[in-house]
Image (cartoon, coloured by chain):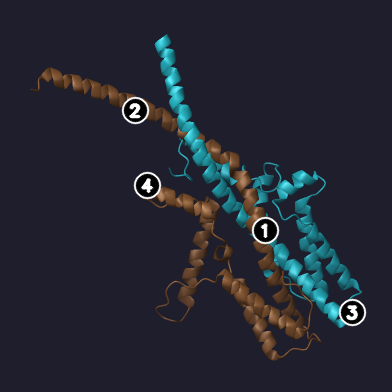
Amino acid sequence: MDEFDSLVNLEQTFFDAGYKDGHAHGRIHGLIEGRALGREKGYEMWEELGYYEGFASTWKAHLVFQGTEDGRITHHLNGLLELISQFPQVNPSVAQAEAGSEVDILKLLRNIRSKYKLLCASLGIRPRLHAADGSEAAQEPVDGAQVKSKKKKSIWEVNDGEGEDEEQSDRKQGQPQTLSF
Amino acid sequence: MDSPWDEEVSNESYNRESQWQKIASDFTNAGYRDGITAGKEGVLQEGFDSGFANTGAPLGREIGRIRGIASALLALLSKGSSIPHSPSTTNELRDISFKLSEIRFSDICPPDLEAEAHAREHMQAEGEELVMDSEELEDRKQVESLEDMLAGMSASGAGRGKPQRPSMDDFNVLKSRLEVVIGQMGLQIHLS
């Protein structure tokens, strides 16, 4: 009995030692992989918002230059710029958690997009292609959110969505595909 | 002198030794696999948030803003703005705008030094290249290389190898060219 116990303990000791090393290695990979994804999503999201911001600021500067800055257009421009300034520059799901559930980031994004299109319409300008093309605009920055929305989670939580399915199957096979070691 | 007896002893002890090692390595490996998954999952979100806030969002905002400014200026000129400008201004803006649109995130994204260092460790330990990108990023890379291939095919110049990708330096050049145009027009616009 004692011998059996000590054998089990020994197995556990080996397991634990392996686990400790694996955990440290997994952390490195998790941070790297998470960072790569986060960079990409943050870029997509803010490239779009930055575009609206630059566009609106320029138009505003032009109205100032012409001395025609009080009017419907100025109103649209200020509204759009104001909304963009409210948008968090950190992962929206984190910002949302911090600000409480009152701030609906996806709603804010939809709002910004429609304000931009409205602005373009009143200026008689064709809106930017990828924003005008609903499929792409909806897919690009929000596709993370779409994957997640099936699970009723907030935006950009990398722990669910595609990654999870992959990792669950990994666990079953006991052989993470995305990691080589 | 060797006797059969001696041989048997050493064989047996060798077997015991290797069995022992097998148990040790089996359990260590099982622990390692569980550990790597747990360790990874625990920090994915942390990595994502830092990549989003520290690199992706600020860089995207900068590029997007410049693109937005360039395209608004073009729109203004095409609508017959009263701003003083020459025909060459429009051409210059078109060129800036086009070159801006060609820039991809992968062209200007700063290297992840930690990732590179870790990939080198893997390289040294296993002698093979490490694929660390998730499926999603892998897909994008494939699309981009396909785009490069098509661009290379449509380019009439024969023998053109890999197309030269723009860099952050190129972006900064475009940015200062835009600044010149804005100055000529006499507008007050902050580029960043």
Residue at 65% from the left image edge and 86% from the top image edge: B91
- Counting from the top left corner in percent of width and height, residue A119 is at 81, 70
Q: Earlier in the sequence, mark 4 or mark 2?
A: 2
- Residue type, label 3: Thr
Q: Which residue is mark 4?
A: B126
Q: Which chain is cyan?
A: A
Alpha carbon distance from label 3 to label 4: 67 Å
Alpha carbon distance from label 1 to label 2: 49 Å
Q: Residues within 10 Å of mark 4 (few under 14, many from 20)?
A: few
Relative to B19, is B54 on the left or the right? right
Marks 3 and 1 in Cβ contact (< 8 Å) = no
Q: Which residue is mark 1?
A: B57
Describe the element under mark 2 as helix, strand or loop. helix
Establish whether labels 4 and 2 are both on one chain: yes
The answer to which of A38 and A9 lies nearer the viewer is A9
Report the chain holding disc 4.
B
Report the chain holding disc 1.
B
| Residue that sits furthest to the front in the current view | B1
The answer to which of B7 and A152 lies nearer the viewer is B7
Report the chain holding disc 3.
A
| Residue that sits furthest to the left in the current view | B1
Describe the element under mark 4 as helix, strand or loop. helix
Please say if A66 is above or below A152.
below
Q: Residues within 10 Å of mark 2 (few under 14, many from 20)?
A: few
Report the chain holding disc 2.
B
Q: What is the quadrant of the C terminus of chain B in the image?
A: bottom right
Question: Which numbered dot is residue B22?
Answer: 2
